[in-house]
Image (spheres, rainbow, N blue to C red):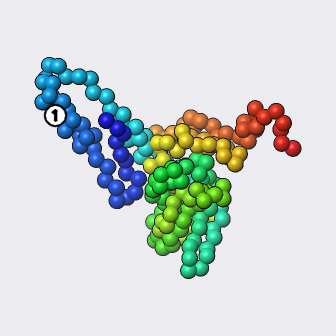
Amino acid sequence: MGGVGINYLPQDQAQPFSFFFDPVIKRVKEYFGEEDLPILVSEPGRSIVGEAGLTLYRIGTIKNIPDIKNYLAVDGGMTDNIRLALYQAKYHAEIINKLGHDKDTMYTVVGKCCESGGILIHDIYLLKASRGDILAVFSTGAYCYSMASNYNMMTKPAIVWVKEGQDYLVTKAQTIEQIYQNDLVYPL
């Protein structure tokens, strides 16, 4: 069996494991009988960590093109989440330092690489954003870090686990010096 889906957007309704496994197990038992059951292997993939992870971005530039579009530029982008550019993944986000206010403004969230693939979220209603606000993009626990790149010499972010209110740094943020460490000519 392939991977089991997760909830990326509030309206998503990912199915429980039993939705996928019960019909398969029933058919296998019908075919093989109770005594000669083969070993079944499943790849639960993103269902293990997908919803457990979120990515925090600091909002930088806010660009309003009247009657056309509002853009939020964040301090990350396609280098830490290439999924929208690759296969049109969709995400839910919130400005977490202003929770409880009305979501009154539609934005397109963009990263800092200035590429056509640098859009993280198309047309999402959020609270009125300000420079320095923190945008949380949910359900990024699977694939984002493992697919992250140093495109445009961008550094990879840190990974922090949180359990019962306690945070644990598990992967340090990459430094620009680490990106250049194998270069034979260091930029001046």
Say which quarter of the image contains residue 18.
Answer: top left
Q: Residue furthest front?
A: 31
Taking the view exactly as shown, the residue that stands out farthest to the top is 35
**Residue at 54% of width from left, 57% of height from top?**
120
- The residue furthest bottom is 67
Q: Is disc 1 placed on a helix, strand or loop?
A: helix
Q: Which residue is mark 1?
A: 26
Q: Is residue 67 above or below residue 179?
A: below
Answer with left or right where residue 123 lies relative to residue 4: right
Q: Quadrant of residue 59?
A: bottom right
Amino acid type, callout 1: Lys
Residue 57 image offset from top left, x and y in percent: 58, 54
Nearer the observer, 143 or 30: 30
Which image quarter holds the C terminus? top right
Tell me the residue at 56%/35% (across/down).
170
For label 1, the crowd category at 10 Å Cα-Cα, with few meaning under 14, some 14 to 19 and many 20 or more, is few
**Residue 32, how many percent across, how many down?**
15, 24
